[in-house]
Amino acid sequence: MPELPDLQVFRGNLQKRFAGKTLQSFTIYNPKKLNTSEEKCKEMLEGQWLKSVKRHGKELYFEFSNKEVLGVHLMLKGQFVELPSDNLSDFILELQFEGGKGLAVADSMALARITLNPKTPTAPDALDYQFNVKYLQDKLQKNPGVPIKSFLIDQKIVRGIGNAYVDEILWEAKVSPFSHTDLLPDSVVRELHRQVKIVLKEGEEKIKILNPDIIAGEIRDFMKIHHPDKTHSPTGSEILVQKLNKRKTYYTKEQIDYLPVVTKPAKKIAVKKAVAKRATPAKKSVLDDLPF
């Protein structure tokens, strides 16, 4: 699934190629993936020129001259295809612009979502100023006992971080992915917040260097930890792989576990109850009945 750095680069390239062009035709091939009717989208978008392409979390918003917005969430396998193209399979959406240029969304799994005028999300984007240290501290305390990896990829808490980049962030911050949210010291929370910004921005820059014109796919070759072909971290520690909530997780023993301290219960000592034995009466002697 494309994550924030991938989508940042896609956004810039789509902006350069299509901004300012008038949309001539809107075609949806899978009506179930659209939150309204195709006729409504045609009415609102055809004849309008594309003003800008923006990224919000893991979605791209295509903003048109009449202020209508078309949101695209690629989900797991969705990808943008510039038209004309030899690849004409698995199309979900097709946008034809003036000058013979077009853009399609293809998805072999048919999971991609297309939304006309998507609702503004309440959770901040990972690169937004609203995602600050105080916000992170507050959310960590309000969600106690959650593995920190699961917390950071929850799009209802912070948008844009996915399964690959969260492993890189946690390794840089030296925090185990299994650490509990409410047990991170303040100094660790500050470093974690700092690494979120650094890792995501560096990821974007590295993608631009490796494939500056990319609008589809994922580039992960530069990743230090989340990489199936790498066995050791840059500092020489063995990379371990384990499932966390069904997600493949890469980490090393360099990362600190912030987990509840488990205290062993005191051993129970079996104490036998003392049983008072009834005294056995002495046997009568024949002498007891004599009168002396």
Image (cartoon, rainbow, N blue to C red):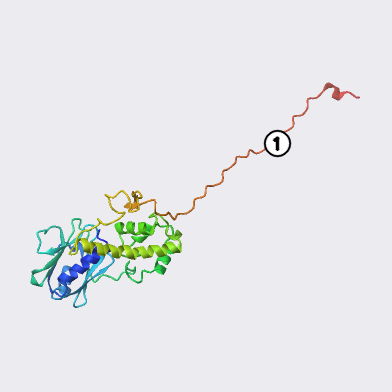
Q: Quadrant of residue 146?
A: bottom left
| Amino acid on which disc 1 is placed | Ala
* Nearer to us in this view, 192 or 43: 192
Q: Is residue 196 left or right of residue 270?
A: left
Q: Residue 160: in sight, yes or no?
A: no
Q: Residue furthest right?
A: 292
Residue at 10% x, 72% y is 98
* Nearer to us in this view, 73 or 30: 73
Q: Position of residue 144 (x, y in %)?
A: 44, 60
Q: Quadrant of residue 27?
A: bottom left
Q: Residue 216: in sight, yes or no?
A: yes
Q: Is residue 109 left or right of residue 239?
A: left
- Quadrant (top left/top right/bottom left/bottom right) for the N terminus: bottom left
Number of residues whose C-alpha sits closer than 10 Å to that of mark 1, classed few (under 14), some (14–19) or many (20 or more) = few
Q: Position of residue 17 (x, y in %)?
A: 15, 70
**In the rendered picture of this protein, how many numbered marks are placed on residues?**
1
Q: Position of residue 12 (x, y in %)?
A: 21, 69
Q: Residue furthest front?
A: 235
Q: Residue furthest top?
A: 286
- Quadrant (top left/top right/bottom left/bottom right) for the C terminus: top right
* Nearer to us in this view, 28 or 83: 83
Q: Quadrant of residue 23?
A: bottom left
* Nearer to us in this view, 68 or 218: 218
Q: Position of residue 217 (x, y in %)?
A: 20, 59
Position of residue 169 relative to residue 274, above or below, is below
Q: Is residue 80 left or right of residue 126?
A: left
Residue at 77% x, 29% y is 281
User: What residue would you read off at disc 1?
Assistant: 276
Residue at 26% x, 57% y is 222
> SS of the residue at dot 1?
loop
Q: Residue furthest bottom?
A: 66
